Image: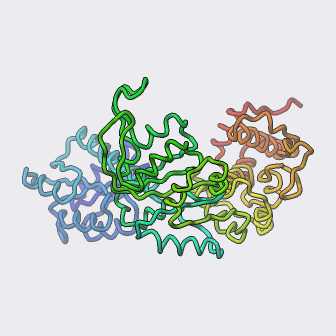
Amino acid sequence: MAKLLIIDDERAIRNTLREILEYENYEVEDIDNGIDGLDLIRKKKYDLVLCDIKMNKMDGMEVLEQALAYSPDLPFIMISGHGTVETAIEASKKGAFDFISKPPDLNRLLITVRNALDRGTLVTETKVLKRKASKTRDILGSSENISKIKETIERVAPTEARVLITGANGSGKELVARWLHEKSQRAESPLIEVNCAAIPSELIESELFGHEKGSFTSAVKQRIGKFELANGGTLFLDEIGDMSLSAQAKVLRALQEHKITRVGGEKELEVNVRVLAATNKDLLKEIEAGNFRMDLYHRLNVINIHVPHLTERTEDIPEIALNFLEEICRDYGMPVKKISDGAMTALQALPWTGNVRELHNMIERLIILSDKVITENDVIAFANPGGGTNIGSANSSNGHAGVVSGAAVDYDKFSNFQDYKDHAEREFIKFKLEKNNWNVSKTADDIDIQRSHLYSKIEKFGLKRAAE
């Protein structure tokens, strides 16, 4: 329910506006002067303010200016019995959403209020989305390995040196690349990422350098490549060990001459790009096997940053896990759960074949399937890839069976993680409902979700109480 504040020194106007707006299911407060109105704005959160212009003690325009200096996104609708075009223009210049003359027309008032609230919502959502899109996650941890990486980033980022980032899948190589860009002189220019392993070898050259119309069968129009898109900024070549030899030769030329040629084109294009590369492969072994060019390796490997496996820095797991816990619970709109000391110890003992990425997924799984406090038993039951009772080891001879809510599970029947998550969530809710004799209110409180949400889950999974 939107919360509105009316600031007007005429009781009759306040009462009329309040009656109209409360009838439309808005929560309304009112005050008779601007000084007290500003005090309320500072103390409470309002979605919209309707403010008179001519008032005792403080003029409405002054209220508008001071309030927006404190809360720039707060929508203001100015109202006055002495309205003129000049007054309306002045109010708009000072940041008011709209201006309404007294006595207000009912339909215009309600439409203006609705539009102002919609605009306020859009402004807030836009800021949240921009923050999510632009924020680079912090490199979490204080182990010796991570401290060394952070120090290297601080030293290397402001330079133009190329960096080769090595490490296992999921260890955080992309994050290191992002921070190298964020702290560089090119931070205001684009960071363009290319996953070399995800692009077929026959298309990688077109992806990197672009192509001219008609240069091959499906080239129906000109395409700008990643090198051109990253001009003035940073190009991050992820999994560069999977790049074809022909593409490697062109990348080497681009690094040497700072020029590229589109596929099917003849014109040379100058590019100013800082290249960062990452790989999970041992490039020296790839060179011996004839799969990677030694000259390109030396061009890329000016600075080497190796990101350690999560099992090499288990002391960082508590900090990372707690950060993921808060972040995921916040995204789900639920109270932040707690992790017991035993559960944290159990997490530190896991093999973490998927590194930090796997830890994030497991924390999400534990949040969904555990009670208010995540225990060691929860980690054993839900987080262990083998599903067994011995942390770090499989529970079955073939490694494909586990335990969910006390029942054996054949992991081979799940095509993806979402299928498994749905299955585990269904079994967990069913177990809790049966434990509480199908008391939905008690079960919802037990697993810390809203009762309406639990009803939706029961319907989604087709759960029914067994006939007695």
Residue 307, quarter of picture: bottom right
Camera-nearest residue between 442 and 133:
133
Residue 258, quarter of picture: bottom left
Q: Along the horizontal axis of the image, is 288 left or right of 80?
A: right
Residue 28 seen in the current view: no
x and y, in percent, of residue 15 in the image? 29, 53
Q: Along the horizontal axis of the image, is 382 left or right of 67?
A: right
Position of the C terminus by quadrant: top right
Camera-nearest residue between 50 and 288:
288
427 w.r.t. 96: above or below: above
Residue name at image x 43 percent, y 56 percent: 134
x and y, in percent, of residue 26 in the image? 39, 48
Residue name at image x 86 percent, y 29 percent: 467
x and y, in percent, of residue 69 in the image? 27, 67
x and y, in percent, of residue 283 in the image? 62, 55
Q: Along the horizontal axis of the image, is 171 left or right of 447?
A: left
Residue name at image x 36 percent, y 58 percent: 29
Seen from this angle, which residue lies furthest top? 217
Residue name at image x 52 percent, y 67 percent: 303
Camera-nearest residue between 365 and 464:
365
297 w.r.t. 155: above or below: above
- Colour mode of the rendering: rainbow
